[in-house]
Amino acid sequence: MKFAFSTIGCPEWSWKDMVATAKDLGYDGIEIRGIANELYVPKTTPFLPENIAATKKLLKEKNLEISMLTSACSFHNKNTIARHMAGGREYIDLAHEAGVPFIRVMCEQTADPQMEIDLAFVSENYAKLAEYAKGSGVTVLMETNGALANTKKMKSFIAPLEAQGLPVGVLWDIHHPFRFFGESIQTTYDNIGEFVKYIHIKDSIMENGEVKYKMLGKGDIPNRELLIFLNNNNYKSYVSLEWVRRWNKDLEAAGIVFPQFIQYVRRIVK
């Protein structure tokens, strides 16, 4: 398997800092979810049309990949669907131009399910976006968050679309099915393993009814079990650290967390 970090964990860093750190620490790739003050990836400096060629050249020289472009596109709100669909298409176009295999989308914005979701409406628009991606080399991944962190629902949701030959798949965020639905690694894998193309990893504990994020190995998410399981099942794609410092500046800085993560996972997966 391959390892990346999401840029959501280092909002204070420049693009050069991100590339240098990934190279120096032995990461395989970088997941792009904003750079500096710009969260919308098509507007970030390294991914402007005039800079994409230089960005690709730099990454090739460093033997690094962009593992995914992480959009905020979601399909639950009928009042904002047009804007989110337009954004999703821009991410697909950019991923195609930059040679990135995946973009991330969501059924809803919150990690834990907080509302009733019209999954038929979500499916209809997700299918439209995936149809747009056909032939581009880009797969549109639906994350296990919100209502679709329940992976029985996710299986029922994704299987018919995959059967149509659409470029779809699942981004398995290990945290959400475990934390919000009490799913074991085996249960989640049995439900959606055949559709998983990318993994987000993080750790946490529950404290006074709230999620408190911790460095890997310091919480109670079964991440060690996950890594051993993936290794035993010959998983080849990315496991990406999603350290949500952009939203929570009280979390440890990336300069501490990124080295600890890669050392932790490399000790387990040899």
Image (cartoon, rainbow, N blue to C red):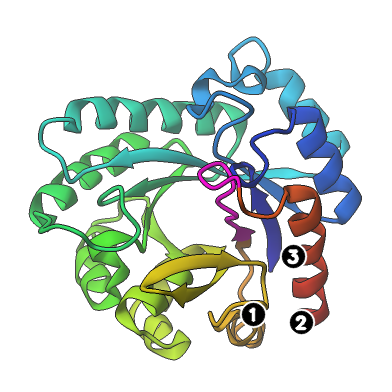
Dots 2, 1 in contact, CB < 8 A: yes
From the image, tell me which residue sits under label 2: 268
From this view, report whether residue 142 is shown above or below residue 17. below
Residue 134's x, y, as percent? 36, 40
Disc 2 element: helix
From the image, tell me which residue sits under label 3: 261
Dots 3, 1 in contact, CB < 8 A: no
- Which residue reaches farthest front? 208
From the image, tell me which residue sits under label 1: 227
Dividing the image into 4 quarters, which one contains the N terminus?
Answer: bottom right
Mark 3 or 1: the one toward you:
3
Mark 3 or 2: the one toward you:
3
- Front-most of 230 and 12? 12
| Horizontal side, residue 238 vs residue 94: left or right | right
Distance, label 3 to label 2, CA atoms, is: 11 Å
Residue plotted at (68% across, 45% down): 30
Q: Is residue 12 within the magenta segment?
A: no
Residue plotted at (20% across, 59% down): 114
Q: What stretch of residues is rendered in magenta?
A: 240-249
Residue 70's x, y, as percent? 49, 42
Distance, label 2 to label 1, CA atoms, is: 7 Å
| Horizontal side, residue 124 vs residue 237: left or right | left
Dividing the image into 4 quarters, which one contains the C terminus?
Answer: bottom right
Residue 264's x, y, as percent? 77, 73
Disc 1 element: helix
What secondary structure is the magenta-colored segment mainly? loop
Residue 263's x, y, as percent? 83, 69
Which amino acid lies under the numbered mark 2 shown in the image of this protein?
Ile
